[in-house]
Image: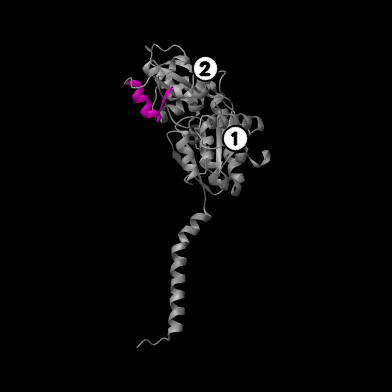
Amino acid sequence: MNPFPSAIRRALLRGLLGLLGAALLAPAAQAQDRKTLRIGFQKYGTLTIVKALGTLDKRLAEQGVTVKWTEFPAGPQLLEGLNVGSIDFGTVGEAPPIFAQAAGAALVYVGSEPAAPASEAILVPKDSPLRGVADLKGRKVALNKGSNVHYLLVKQLERAGVAYRDVNVVYLTPSDARAAFERGAIDAWVIWDPFQAAAEKQLGARVLADGAGVVKNYQFFLAASGYEKAHPQIIQTVLDEVRKGDLWARDHRAESVALLQPVLGLDREIVELAASRLAYGVQPITREVLLEQQQVADAFHALKLIPKPLNVFDAAPSILK
């Protein structure tokens, strides 16, 4: 016979369940209490330099913040990581934020680097008969969908009077596109540095056209809007350290190339070429830059590459809203 009345048994059970729940939830609560910044980066550019220098990790550690770095092959994949909540901060080119915002990502532009139009290009094999962008009509052209070079192709075709639909666009990641380019499975490859520099130096690839006079090719720093709202000081610390890293790389070109070379696994001359085309100096987001981003969004919507019109100012920092 059970010595406890049913009411007491129920109360004891509730108490035990409560203790068990508290024990199970304690690690999660502790994890939430610990500040963590999850940064998405691509294996190139300022964030890679800052990561290698270790200055950001050290400064944030002094504030009780742990930095977790995650590498992505390209901007669209990085912002997909931000969209699903696996990172809090990252840097990408012009087009990825447009596609991410169209997919419902809660992001905010927090900084940018100056225009670097020569850091992306349409490449063709050295012995290709193609001599101008107009020659791409009916040809197979590879690019990473939703990346900065996607907009480069759109604008270069527009300038040459070629309809986007008249080009056979093949969506490939940089590594897959490089392999297709090498075996002659595609006629042209639209790509950014350091992949661009590597193809030029290793394969003798020829630049059919780059972004000069056509696109700006800004690099944007973005944060998950929830994280930026909850931790604005952490984001400002990050931008401050990235700005310092940017200026250090500008003033110490040889040292920054030496720092990047083992990370990239590329010959020094390739890294030097790519570094020579970078733009340096992190800047606050301005209305003028976002108006140019609006043009990117409008162009992609006109081509039905994003399903609906987009207002990029919905992702603007609060000071510009």
Q: Nearer the viewer, residue 152 or 91?
A: 152
Marks 1 & 2, CB-CB < 8 Å contact: no
- Image point 44% across, 11% down: which residue? 131
Residue found farthest to the left: 183
Amino acid tagged 2: Gly
- Image point 46% across, 42% down: which residue? 81
Quarter containing the N terminus? bottom left
- Mark 1 closeness class: few <14, some 14–19, many ≥20 residues within 10 Å: many
Residue 81 higher or lower than 258, as above or below: below
Q: Nearer the viewer, residue 198 or 170?
A: 170
Q: How is the image coloured?
A: one colour
- Secondary element at image label 2: loop
What residue is pinned by disc 1?
A: 111
- Secondary element at image label 1: strand
Q: Give residue 157's position: percent from left, percent from top.
A: 50, 20
What residue is pinned by disc 2?
A: 161
Disc ID at residue 45: none
Residue 32 higher or lower than 275, as above or below: below
Residue 85 higher or lower than 200, as above or below: below
- Image point 58% across, 42% down: which residue? 235
| Residue 193 appears in the figure | no
Amino acid tagged 1: Gly
Q: Image quadrant of residue 213? A: top right
| Magenta stretch in the rendered image | 167-182
| Residue 124 appears in the figure | yes
Q: Nearer the viewer, residue 185 or 249?
A: 185
- Mark 2 closeness class: few <14, some 14–19, many ≥20 residues within 10 Å: few
Q: Give residue 119's position: percent from left, percent from top.
A: 50, 22
Q: Give residue 91's position: percent from left, percent from top.
A: 52, 35
